[in-house]
Amino acid sequence: MTELVIMDGGMGRELERVGAPFSQPLWSAQALIESPQHVLQAHENFIHSGAELIITNSYACVPFHLGRDLYQSRGTELASLSGKLAKQAKLNMNTSVNVSGSLPPPFGSYRPDLFLPDEAESIYTELMKAQEPYVDSWIVETLSSVVEFEIAHKVLNSSDKPRYYAFTLSDKLNEQPTLRSGESVRQAITKACELGADAVLFNCSVPEVMEQALADSNEIMNRCSVSMTLGAYANSFSAIQSDHEANDTLQAMRPLSPLEYLAFAQRWYEAGARIIGGCCGIGPEHIEELAKWKSNLSQ
């Protein structure tokens, strides 16, 4: 994949914007339970804005958001529904958009200290099987550590669909960018090269930290003589601290206009990113600006 691909934006905030039921701790899963038509509408909004890759709304279909009991009784059912709705949006819009099945953090975003490898493997496997009939590719989102990547990759080895892995970065501007675990991007990319990832992206971090992570990734890939597609999809959050509790409150947002976001995206593209979209707080208006820019790249 060498041509630029435009992804969708943040599903949770778009659901909230279009009027879907939305509260913690269920977050984006609440719309799957109570108002699936809003999930369909949100996907179609992103496709209409120019997204060529959309991600299923399965991010909150995990014990962390649903709770243990609801996950056991309905988790895979809701994940399956997220795949059906994304595929239906693709059919409704008569488009060749790539539907990517999301495998989210099972125990909370940005908290590598809470990760349980054996239980995570089971959850990843269940979510993968639930979405398999409806998706074209996989994206493991908001990976905070190398071990999380290793477990997810082990699960996805049983699928023949493209496998994308998105690491979340520390929001501190450091000379050497790091994952939320404190491990360096260089360590993560070295492991991704060893295991044969199809693509590595950086997500759900402030946009300022993406460019150096992409530069470090290219350096490691060149050193290992490995070619992987790179990508980035940032959020519009304030900086996230290491003790963040995702279910406590909605994370504080900052103003980030479509043109401001585009300026970041253009730098990511120059740094080698070929999949670019948005995470939390990045809406259809931002994706539309990215799509317009892409259309001018070939002119």
Image (cartoon, rainbow, N blue to C red):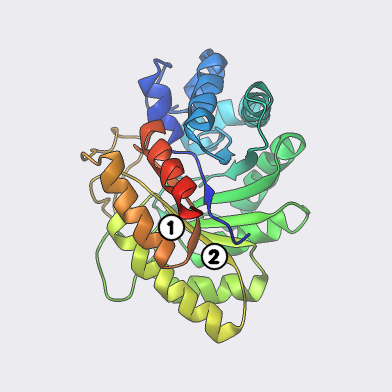
Question: Is residue 184 in sight in this rendering?
Answer: no
Residues 138 and 242: in front is 138
Q: Residue at x 37, y 57 (%)?
A: 266
The kind of residue on which mark 1 rests is Pro
Give above or below for 191 relative to 53: below
Q: Which residue is mark 2?
A: 147
Q: Residue at x 41, y 56 (%)?
A: 168
Task: Provide the residue designation for mark 1.
Answer: 112
Q: Residue type at mark 2?
A: Val
In three-dimensional space, the C-alpha distance between marks 2 and 1, rounded to whole angstroms, equals 9 Å
Comparing 166 with 61, the one in front is: 166
Task: Evaluate if marks 2 and 1 touch, with contact meaning CB atoms under 8 Å apart.
Answer: yes
Q: Where on the picture, by quarter, is residue 242?
A: bottom left
Q: Seen in the image, is 132 located left or right of residue 117?
A: right
Q: Position of residue 42 (x, y in %)?
A: 49, 25
| Image quarter (top left, top right, bottom left or bottom right) of the N terminus | bottom right
Instruction: Name the side, left or right, on which 206 lies relative to 25.
Output: left
Image location (x, y in percent) of residue 47: 54, 31
Residue at 50%, 36% (x, y): give it: 50
- Where is residue 250 drawn, in percent x and y? 29, 33
